[in-house]
Amino acid sequence: MARANAITTAALNAKHKGVYRWLSDGGGRGAGRLVAMIRQGGPVFYFQHFDAGRRKRFLPIGPYDSTGRRGWSLQRARDRAAELSELYRSGVADL
């Protein structure tokens, strides 16, 4: 069963209701994670991680597009987040 705030195709395609919402793929502590902000202009993907000062940071990946032609498909965004997670866990501080 999916978590309530999980990133799913259905959640990304749901009608915007005038309030920003965040969806998250979750992930292990210290690995960073893929998140999506649902907004008026459409969902946007980010890689969320913490800097050395333990401040939450959001690295933009790009806008969601189910076809992947004008933006990032969910699978492609997950693949990119996995690449960034690997860099982050290896100690690269400046993503």
Image: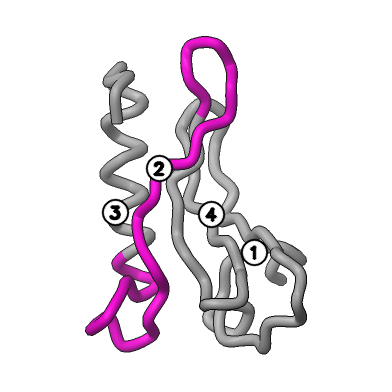
Circle 2 SS class: strand
Which residue position holds label 3?
80
Residue farthest to the top, as pictured: 53
Closer to the chain start, of discs 2 and 4, is 4
Which residue position holds label 2?
59
The amino acid at mark 3 is Arg
Residue 62 covered by magenta stretch:
yes
- Highlighted range, magenta: 50-76
Identify the residue at image location x=75%, y=77%.
18
Q: Which mark is residue 6?
A: 1
Which residue position holds label 4?
35
The answer to whether 94 is drawn above or below residue 63 in the figure is above
Circle 4 SS class: strand
Q: Are marks 3 and 4 in contact (CB under 8 Å)?
A: no
Residue in front for this viewpoint, 83 or 69: 69
- Res 8 → quadrant: bottom right
Residue 33 covered by magenta stretch:
no
Q: Nearer the viewer, mark 2 or mark 4?
A: 2
Circle 3 SS class: helix
The amino acid at mark 1 is Ala
Q: Determine the CA span between mark 3 and mark 1.
A: 17 Å
Q: Determine the CA span between mark 2 and mark 4.
A: 10 Å
Q: Determine the CA span between mark 2 and mark 3.
A: 11 Å
